[in-house]
Image (cartoon, rainbow, N blue to C red):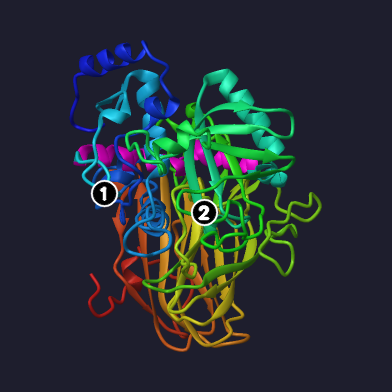
């Protein structure tokens, strides 16, 4: 919670007075400032966006390693600044979600309805109250909650989120059941090209030609100019459905979304964007982070993501194939394979619904999969200067960091979610140096062993390296190493007395296997090690 409580009596009086005139939804749900950017979300935002995240990131807990990885790779800057501009992309999701919660309950996170009474500190600068900025950032983080991601998977399945008829039908259902909701749209079929969130409050029109009426954080009632309040009073505030397609003119753009072209140029062709309906009952409440591990969750949720190391750009996943032959993409494309015979099934791209895309090369790509994936292989490229790849769920994860840019490689894993996972990196296009990390689920929900193998140099072509865990009894390392590497381990446990971090051990081609970093007989502390 935000550490402050504001009296709501004055706000309630304003609401009571407003009953005397026909209040436009933009006046009820809109803010006194327009959408603004935040370049980075600190750990305090992460910890308050979800349940189960300790306020101190230096602590150790059962899912600490994957929670910290998820924060660094997917939340810290990727969520607020996906283009890597250094200035941020927008808080439209957080503004819309907090507004709905304030109006539903009269107040939320210490702020009372109506939102329009909260002033800004200048055009595009956000609220003048820093605590309100924190509240909006926290709500913006809700878009990556476990509940929201399960909704994305459900709507993206078989391309439903790209079918406007499906979206309009779901919109009518949600409005009839619980009232206004969050409507999230993307610029194109690839969510990385841009996304936006608004409040949807009504659907009108004849079948096949409906309008979804919206309140847009980029256009505020408090500003009486033609581009803001005038947009509402002229009746322009809608998403238009035309058969299976939809269109929406973003503020300041020359061509409507969705488009596969440049929306800053008039006449760009219509594309195939996503339209996602998020009920407030899903989006509003604080939920679990999707990186939660060791929980008795009703659905296994697997995360697959790649991120650029430092300023690395153009990173990407080329293909993912499961042990039973299913694939992520239609061969030779980046389009998700929805074929029931060859595709993964319930999978969703990593949506970012707070991003008006800057035209910059990709530095992050991710997918969510509903179900178990004990074994698979993934092909990736490391971008301009290196990349990290992670795959994980409630029961375990694997991670590979490639230090060099300009490389392609393949990783293979098996036994994910067990005490005996294995991870292999192979088929590199050039000599590369990699770090390997995996989690052995020694006692699900109670104790896990994490093994890390650092600075492994492998040759191009047939060269490979494999890290195989044997529960809490160490690992076996096999393959071709061009020089010595370093091994360490960590025990994550609910019982603080069982937590442990090992010293680093030097690993060479002649090191006898298996080796247990938690056994003192095998420790050879590296320079600078503990």
Image quarter of the C terminus:
bottom left
Q: Is residue 245 left or right of residue 190?
A: right
Total marks placed: 2
Say whether residue 150 is magenta.
yes
Instruction: Check residue 392 in the rendering and tell me which mark sits there, or answer none.
Output: 2
Residue identifier under label 1: 125
SS at badge 1: loop
Q: Is residue 349 left or right of residue 124?
A: right
* Residue 109, visible in the rendered structure: no
Q: Is residue 328 above or below residue 290?
A: below
Q: Nearer the viewer, residue 126 or 209?
A: 209
Where are the magenta residues, as a range?
Answer: 130-155
**Percent x, y for residue 340?**
79, 49
Q: Nearer the viewer, residue 288 or 171?
A: 171
Tell me which label, 2 or 1, sits earlier in the chain.
1
SS at badge 2: strand
């Amino acid at each position: 919670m935000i550490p402050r409580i504001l009296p709501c009596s004055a706000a309630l009086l304003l609401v009571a007075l407003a009953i005397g005139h026909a209040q436009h939804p933009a006046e009820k749900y809109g803010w006194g400032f327009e959408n603004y950017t935040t370049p980075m979300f600190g750990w305090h935002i992460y910890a308050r966006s979800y349940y189960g995240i300790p306020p101190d990131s230096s602590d150790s807990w059962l899912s600490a390693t994957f929670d910290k990885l998820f924060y660094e790779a997917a939340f810290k800057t990727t969520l607020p600044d996906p283009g890597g501009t250094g200035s941020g992309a927008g808080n439209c999701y957080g503004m819309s979600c907090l507004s709905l919660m304030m109006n539903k309950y009269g107040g939320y996170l210490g702020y009372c309805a109506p939102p329009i009474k909260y002033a800004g500190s200048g055009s595009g600068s956000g609220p003048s109250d820093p605590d309100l900025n924190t509240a909006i950032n926290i709500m913006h983080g809700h878009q990556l909650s476990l509940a929201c991601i399960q909704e994305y998977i459900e709507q993206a399945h078989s391309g439903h989120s790209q079918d406007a008829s499906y979206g309009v039908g779901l919109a009518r259902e949600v409005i009839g059941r619980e009232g206004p909701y969050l409507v999230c749209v993307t610029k194109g079929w690839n969510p990385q090209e841009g996304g936006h969130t608004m409040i949807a409050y009504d659907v009108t029109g004849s079948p096949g030609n409906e309008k979804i009426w919206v309140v847009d954080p980029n256009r505020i009632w408090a500003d009486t100019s033609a581009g803001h309040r005038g947009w509402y009073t002229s009746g322009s505030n809608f998403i238009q459905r035309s058969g299976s397609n939809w269109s929406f003119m973003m503020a300041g753009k020359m061509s409507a979304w969705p488009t596969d072209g440049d929306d800053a140029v008039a006449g760009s062709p219509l594309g195939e964007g996503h339209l996602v309906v998020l009920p407030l009952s899903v989006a509003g409440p604080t939920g679990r982070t999707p990186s939660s591990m060791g929980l008795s969750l009703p659905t296994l949720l697997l995360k697959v993501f790649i991120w650029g190391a430092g300023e690395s750009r153009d990173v990407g996943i080329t293909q993912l194939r499961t042990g039973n032959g299913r694939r992520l993409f239609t061969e030779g494309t980046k389009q998700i394979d929805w074929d029931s015979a060859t595709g993964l099934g319930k999978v969703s791209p990593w949506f970012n619904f707070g991003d008006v895309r800057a035209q910059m090369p990709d530095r992050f790509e991710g997918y969510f999969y509903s179900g178990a994936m004990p074994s698979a292989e993934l092909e990736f490229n490391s971008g301009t200067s290196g990349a990290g790849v992670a795959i994980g769920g409630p029961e375990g994860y694997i991670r590979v960091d490639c230090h060099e840019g300009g490389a392609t490689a393949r990783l293979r894993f098996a036994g994910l979610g067990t005490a005996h996972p294995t991870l292999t990196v192979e088929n590199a296009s050039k000599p590369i140096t990699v770090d390997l990390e995996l989690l052995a689920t020694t006692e699900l929900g109670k104790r896990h062993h994490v093994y890390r193998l650092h600075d492994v140099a492998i040759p191009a072509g047939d060269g490979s390296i494999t890290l195989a865990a044997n529960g809490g009894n160490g690992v076996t390392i096999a393959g071709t190493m061009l020089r010595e590497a370093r091994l360490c381990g960590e025990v994550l446990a609910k019982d603080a007395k069982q937590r442990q971090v090992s010293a680093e051990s030097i690993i060479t081609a002649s090191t006898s296997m298996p080796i247990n970093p938690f056994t003192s007989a095998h420790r050879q502390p590296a320079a600078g090690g503990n």
